[in-house]
Image (cartoon, rainbow, N blue to C red):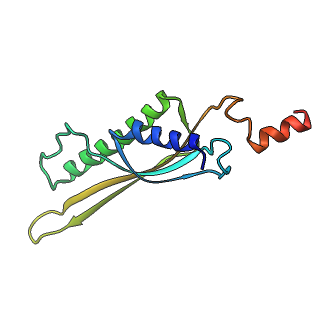
Amino acid sequence: MSLSSIREIAAIHELTDPWLRITSYKQARDSGGLYPEGPYSFEAEVKVGPDALLAGDWGSARAAREVQEHLVGRAAEALAELEAAGWHLAANWTIEMTTRATRRIGQSSLQDHIGAVIRFAVDRDRTDEEMAMDPGVVAARILGY
């Protein structure tokens, strides 16, 4: 992995930290450290906002929907922040919602432990200097493209 890739991954962590807790990432290719290896794929847990007011009617279906909407909104905000910083989605993103529903005798079901995991891939436009050692770029220059 190149130092440039390490810096890019760290920048993505920093940009998304208010919204996401990145749990894993992988690079598209291993260049042996000669050039950036983007795009990068990530998996992250969506964080609940620090000012979120999600406690009303806890255990109701309405409260569960509010939590789900909040988490999806937070994921979208993280992706918008990446886009604003010059990173574009390199693939479709997915979000997986998890919850545990329990039923007590005489009561409606209660949802708790609602969480969201987002999977996304991002890359950015690169300068000719950054891609100077990319095998595709080198081959194109040799072949006159």
Relative vertical location of residue 145 with respect to residue 22 in this rendering, above or below: above
Residue at 21 percent across and 39 percent down: it is 50
Image-quadrant location for residue 23: bottom left
Is residue 10 rendered to the left or right of residue 21?
A: right
| Any part of residue 3 in sight | yes
Percent x, y of residue 38? 61, 43
* Vertical position of residue 97 compared to residue 13: above or below: below
User: Which residue is at 74% across, 35% downward?
Assistant: 132
Question: Is 47 in front, or is 38?
Answer: 38
Residue at 89% from the left image edge and 38% from the top image edge: 142
Report x, y in % for residue 57. Answer: 12, 49
Q: Residue furthest right?
A: 143
Give 74 or 136, whichever is nearer the viewer.
136
Q: Residue furthest bottom?
A: 105
Q: Residue at x 40, y 38 (%)?
A: 14
How far across and how far down the image is residue 105, in percent? 10, 72
Residue 76 visible in rendering: no
